[in-house]
Structure formats: structure tokens, C-alpha cells
Image (cartoon, grey):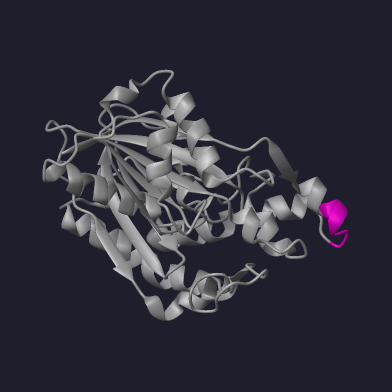
């Protein structure tokens, strides 16, 4: 039904290493940070660098090998848009000089956003509204982080990933699984700055790490089982599992709980950190380049986090 024809990503030039964090917080040890969360380096957007800017740079890399005239729809996933309005996807259409007949919309999701984006792209393609969708996942969470918040600063990085989703009738029509539990919304939130609390200089991100961990462990094993069942597949049918790259501790716990073989499970965030909606496409791109994903591979992807929101699906390459 759909095919991922290309993936590219862009990381900002500014970097924050574990050694940098150790200098700011002497009670922390660079090696222990890596051992705990599996991250050495995260990239940080410049003061005047936005999600739109990162997305544009990723697209410029993509267009070195992909003809942008094929694109007929932009889906832009971000929780750090340039403006409340207008839509960032509309601005990207103009900046890329795509035809005015190109459709464009934003959607606000975090760590499940890439999987939701694939489902939305599939829907657009299935009703004939698009043939080649540019799925953008771009975040600059660093702009929401307090300078003294050493925990979240060690986890999150900024990035953009761009993925071409195209109509391909030779691919199997795999189904997606999604879920929501909005009762946990306050456990990962930027509380101020929007309509509920109005204008504010305090737009810092709050994350209740233990509650996010508990939510993930309670819901994601069932999500994997449901996705396999919907598609009449077993664990043995899947060549690779690519989950949202939250942190290595959580991923290893999930892998064991889901009983996924280590050689079929991707952990790939050492040089980029948790880039929210961009982690899965970045990990997929890496797996394609290093040969872990081959022609015909079936890959189960799963995203989960802020909202609470979760989604999973099967991709055939």
C-alpha cells in the first residue's frame, strides 16, 4: 500500500556532550550518563534556529537524491512550531518552492508522531488525495528546557527528519494500532504560553520521568501484541523492531518485557539523543545504511510518550 522511498535527517551544529554537562554539574559523571541513558552527544538548535529551519536543511539533503517535484502533500509533525499560526507546513511549502497545488498541514504529536504520520500519509494516499507525501518530524525541545534541568538536558536533542511516503501497490496493506490516555497529560507538559494560562516568559518543559516510565511499561507490550495480531504476524515474522529512542534504560527494559531478541532490536541515540518525533526515522535511516534493513524486511515501529499517546505499525521495505 505504501512505501518509504527515502529518509534524511539534519542535526544542528551546536552540540552538548556528556563532558559539557559534567563541567556544569560536577556531581555528574560523563561515563555514568552514557551508561544510564545511552547518549554521548545531543545537538541543540541555535537561538534563532527553529523547527522550520531544521526541516528545510533536512529537505535540502533529501533533494540531492530525490526529485522534489514528485511531492504533492506535506505533513509536518512538531510541538515546537515557529508560530501558533500560520501552519509551519505552509511556510515549508513556500520555502521549498513547491507547487501551490501541494497540500500541507501540521499535527501536534511528540514521540508517537512519526507512526501517526505514516498512518495519516497512508490515509491520504488511500483516498487518492496524494501519491507522494513529505512527512516531516522536527523538534527543538531545547528551547523549553531550563538551564538547571540537568536531567532533561541530558536526554533531549533537537533534530529534523524528512521521509518520503509513496503509493506502492506491491507492498502489503499493513494495519496500524494507536491509543491515547489523556489523563496523563500533566506528566510531560509545557504548561504556560498557550491559551489556558496565556502569555508567559516561563515556557519550560516539565517531565515526570517515573510516571512516563510506568506508562510505557504498562502499555507498549500490549501495543506490540495488538499490532502483530492485527496483521496476522508473530514475533518471528518481524526482522527488526524500531521503537522511539527515549533512553537506553527504558528500551532495554521494554525489549526484555516484550521478549524481543537483542539482535532484532535497535538502540541508536548515542550521537543525537532523544529527538522526540524524529528518533524513529533517524534510527530507520541508520539501519538502512548499515544493512540491518534489507529489501523485503518487515520492521515493527512503535512510538509512545507525551499525551499520553502511542502508536505502532509494520513497514515492509
Horizontal and vertical percent for residue 40? 69, 44
* Residue 135 placement (x, y as % from top left): 35, 41
- The answer to whether residue 308 is above or below residue 260 is below
Q: Where does the image place residue 274, in percent across and percent down from the top left? A: 56, 51
Residue 230 picture quarter: bottom left
Q: Residue at x 53, y 56 (%)?
A: 246
Residue at the image position 79 percent from the left and 53 percent from the top: 21
Number of labels in the image equals: 0
Please say whether residue 177 is one of the residues in the magenta stretch.
no
Q: Nearer the viewer, residue 194 or 43?
A: 194
Residue at (40%, 56%) from the top-left corner?
303
Viewer-proximal residue among 208 and 73:
73
Q: Quarter of the image for the C terminus: give it.
A: top left
Residue 248: image x %, image y %?
57, 54
Q: Which residues are magenta?
A: 22-27
Find residue 269 and report its image quarter. Answer: top right
Q: Residue furthest bottom?
A: 183
Taking depth in this image into account, of 272 and 138 the one nearest to the observer is: 138
Query: Looking at the image, can residue 96 be seen?
Result: yes
Q: In the shown orientation, is residue 92 left or right of residue 129? A: right
Tell me if residue 36 can be seen. Answer: no
Residue that appears at 50% across and 55% down: 83
Left of 102 or right of it: where is 20? right
Residue 25 located within the stretch drawn in magenta:
yes
Left or right relative to 21: residue 277: left
The N terminus, quarter of image? top left
Amino acid at each position: 500500500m505504501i512505501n518509504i522511498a527515502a529518509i534524511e535527517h539534519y542535526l544542528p551544529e551546536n552540540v552538548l556532550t556528556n563532558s559539557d554537562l559534567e563541567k556544569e554539574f560536577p556531581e555528574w559523571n560523563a561515563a555514568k550518563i552514557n551508561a544510564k541513558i545511552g547518549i554521548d552527544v545531543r545537538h541543540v538548535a541555535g537561538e534563532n534556529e527553529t523547527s522550520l529551519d531544521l526541516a528545510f536543511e533536512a529537505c535540502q539533503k533529501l533533494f540531492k537524491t530525490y526529485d522534489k517535484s514528485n511531492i504533492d502533500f506535506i505533513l509536518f509533525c512538531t510541538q515546537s512550531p515557529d508560530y501558533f499560526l500560520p501552519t509551519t507546513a505552509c511556510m515549508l511549502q513556500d520555502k521549498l518552492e513547491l507547487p501551490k497545488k501541494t497540500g500541507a498541514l501540521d499535527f501536534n504529536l511528540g514521540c508517537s508522531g512519526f507512526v501517526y504520520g505514516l498512518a495519516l500519509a497512508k490515509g491520504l494516499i488511500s483516498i487518492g488525495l496524494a501519491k507522494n507525501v513529505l512527512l516531516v518530524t522536527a523538534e527543538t525541545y531545547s528551547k523549553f528546557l531550563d538551564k538547571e534541568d540537568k536531567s532533561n538536558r541530558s536526554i533531549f536533542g533537537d533534530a529534523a527528519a524528512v521521509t518520503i511516503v509513496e503509493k506502492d501497490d506491491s507492498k502489503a496493506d499493513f494495519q496500524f494500532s494507536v491509543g491515547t490516555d489523556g489523563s496523563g497529560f500533566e506528566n510531560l507538559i509545557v504548561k504556560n504560553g498557550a491559551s489556558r494560562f496565556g502569555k508567559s516568559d516561563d515556557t519550560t518543559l516539565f517531565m515526570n520521568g517515573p510516571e512516563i516510565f510506568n506508562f510505557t511499561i504498562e502499555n507498549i507490550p500490549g501495543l506490540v501484541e495488538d499490532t502483530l495480531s492485527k496483521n496476522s504476524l508473530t514475533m518471528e515474522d518481524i526482522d527488526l523492531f524500531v521503537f522511539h529512542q527515549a533512553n537506553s534504560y527504558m528500551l532495554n527494559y521494554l525489549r526484555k518485557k516484550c521478549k524481543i531478541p537483542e539482535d532484532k532490536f535497535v538502540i541508536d541515540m548515542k550521537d543525537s539523543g532523544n529527538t522526540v518525533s524524529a528518533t524513529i526515522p533517524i534510527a530507520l535511516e541508520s539501519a538502512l545504511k548499515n544493512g540491518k534493513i534489507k529489501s523485503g524486511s518487515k520492521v515493527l515501529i512503535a512510538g509512545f510518550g507525551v499525551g499520553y499517546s502511542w502508536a505502532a505499525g509494520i513497514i515492509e521495505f
